Image: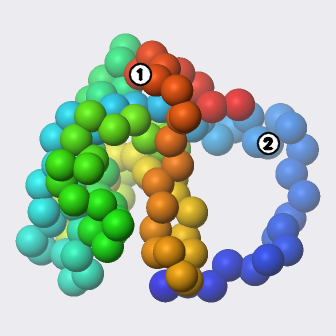
Amino acid sequence: MEQISPQPLQILDFETFLQVDMRVGTIIEVQENIKAKKPAYILKIDFGELGIKTSSAQIVENYTKDDLLHRQIVAVMNFPPKLVAGVKSEVLVLAAVCDFQGTVLLQPNLSVKNGVRIM
């Protein structure tokens, strides 16, 4: 796993931050990605009016398929799609990556409408 510097790499202005389109979606389908080198899930995520998007996520160590189904998450919507272990990953699901706790999903603490933008 890539080590992240404890210090910010670059100071961004607010206009640059706004270019990152982060939205809330609900996971509606979870499958194991059997082609992945490291254990991963294929997620189908409902972003409301923005549609249903697919993502591949290495979050198996902390979450079962049942844990993930119907869970709201936060994802970056405007990265280009990337082919990950045979899956066209259309969004990047956001998580805290910790040495001790592994990968912990970011999620709203109250239910919100799918597609709501994170600011």
Q: Is residue 78 visible?
A: no
On residue 69, which mark appears?
A: none
**Few, some or many C-alpha atoms within 10 Å of disc 1 (few <14, some 14-19, many ≥20)?**
many
Q: How many labels does the image show?
A: 2
Residue 24 vertical placement versus 40 (above, below) = above
Of residues 58 and 17, the one drawn nearer to the viewer in this rendering: 58
Residue 104 picture location, percent across and down: 48, 61
Residue 8 picture location, percent across and down: 84, 68
Q: Can residue 73 be seen in this view?
A: yes
- x 52%, y 26%: residue: 110
Which comes sooner in the sequence, label 2 or label 1? 2
Do the residues bearing badges 2 and 1 touch, measured as CB atoms within 8 Å? no
Dot 1 corresponds to which residue? 114
- x 18%, y 49%: residue: 66
Locate the C terminus by quadrant.
top right
**Few, some or many C-alpha atoms within 10 Å of disc 2 (few <14, some 14-19, many ≥20)?**
few
